[in-house]
Amino acid sequence: MSPHPSPATPSDEPRPAPPSRVLVLNSGSSSVKYRLLEMSDGSRLASGLVERIGERTSLVRHTPSASRGEPRERTGPVADHEAALKAMAEELDADGLGLDSPALAAIGHRVVHGGMHFTEPTVVDEAVLAEIERLIPVAPLHNPANLTGIRTATALRPDLPQVAVFDTSFHTTMPESAARYAIDVRTADEHRVRRYGFHGTSHAYVSRETARLLGKAPEDVNVIVLHLGNGASASAVRGGRCVDTSMGLTPLEGLVMGTRSGDVDPAVIFHLTRVGGMSVDEIDTLLNKKSGLVGLCGDNDMREIRRRVDAGDEEAKLAFDIYIHRLKKYIGAYYAVLGRVDAVAFTAGVGENAAPVREAAVAGLAGLGLEVDAGRNGARGTGPRLISPDGARVAVAVVPTDEEMEIATQTYALVRKPN
């Protein structure tokens, strides 16, 4: 035996751990929301929000994991999205989580509209950017901001995969019978008029988590998902695949929302133009920003509406009743579409927190197997939970959504695929 150890060969040297972190960016018109995740265990390393971009009173909120420090915030002008992402980078760097870290595997971006072209998460290149830009006319408030976020992040880390995860992609499995409007086919095709659906990352995550809650595989479960926030949408998910959803060409169609009307007779627009003398832009503003709950009663916060209802306010009560009536119609419609329903899952701000909404939405539907247990429904909770009685034919669940985790999961799965 040699008295001296042999020099280490390249194969003997420890290999560096593969990058396992994903930064998720949700770029809005005047804000950037972010979360940094360690994908090996799903832990949150940091999260934050830069809001009021372009104003002198911009706000940067940053929350590191508990082991890395306390939440912090600062105010001051943040001129644009480039400055916002630089502010984010500074906060991450202060926690030892800089964007230059070799542990960062990719940056995942929420993109609202992917049309029919993008059916799954996609690594961004110039062709992808061009297609997202081409879809701006059908998502004028969202896609431009999403593009800005992608381009700014690419400039900060040009060597890193930038992955677009589309709100619409989960809904591309809808059959043509659900996705098509009954208008002239040539006109529809020329102008890309069809039902795309939105909130797709939330519907994908919640439908899968609902199956997990039931102890079943997603492919064995039929779920009606009710994403109820200021924006609201429903989906019918059969075996993990969306077969119908309430939002359409834009996020305006479907349920009554905080400021959006949801379904209206299209002739309302003609009537308001011819009789009311309103312009297209005025009607657009009316239906998207001055309708829904705020148009009905002046409030779009469900907590305030319920307070007013409990105080005997008839205007608030009518708004609540209209909201519930539309919601119940969609539950019944999607029950018919699916044929068999294993669960109805409530999610997002209203769905997760407003027990009176959940109770009213299924009231009178016991014949369909839908009921809530008053005690379970009224109890506060933070994780996925059943609120239906023991032995109920259809489970009624509250499943907190996590769109950032869904984006990170899809992003990480894509960049880990072998070439």
Image (tube, grey):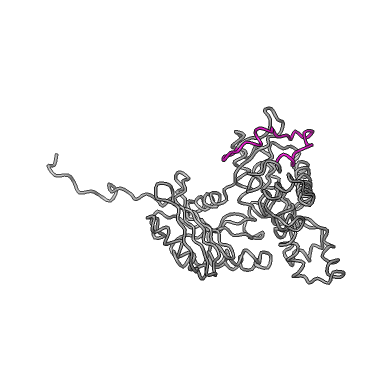
**Residue at 75% of width from left, 62% of height from top?**
287
| Quadrant containing the N terminus in the rendered view | top left
- Percent coordinates x, y for residue 288 in the rendering: 72, 62
| Number of marks in the rendered image | 0
**Residue at 78% of width from left, 66% of height from top?**
187
Instruction: Name the residue at the left extreme.
Output: 3
The span picked out in magenta is 358-384
> For this rendering, which residue is in front, 121 or 24?
24
Magenta residue check for 132:
no
- Percent coordinates x, y for residue 189 in the rendering: 75, 64
Res 405 seen here: yes
**Residue at 71% of width from left, 43% of height from top?**
357
**Residue at 63% of width from left, 48% of height from top?**
348
Q: Is residue 6 left or right of residue 263?
A: left
Q: Is residue 105 left or right of residue 390?
A: left
Magenta residue check for 382:
yes
Occupied quadrant, residue 111:
bottom right
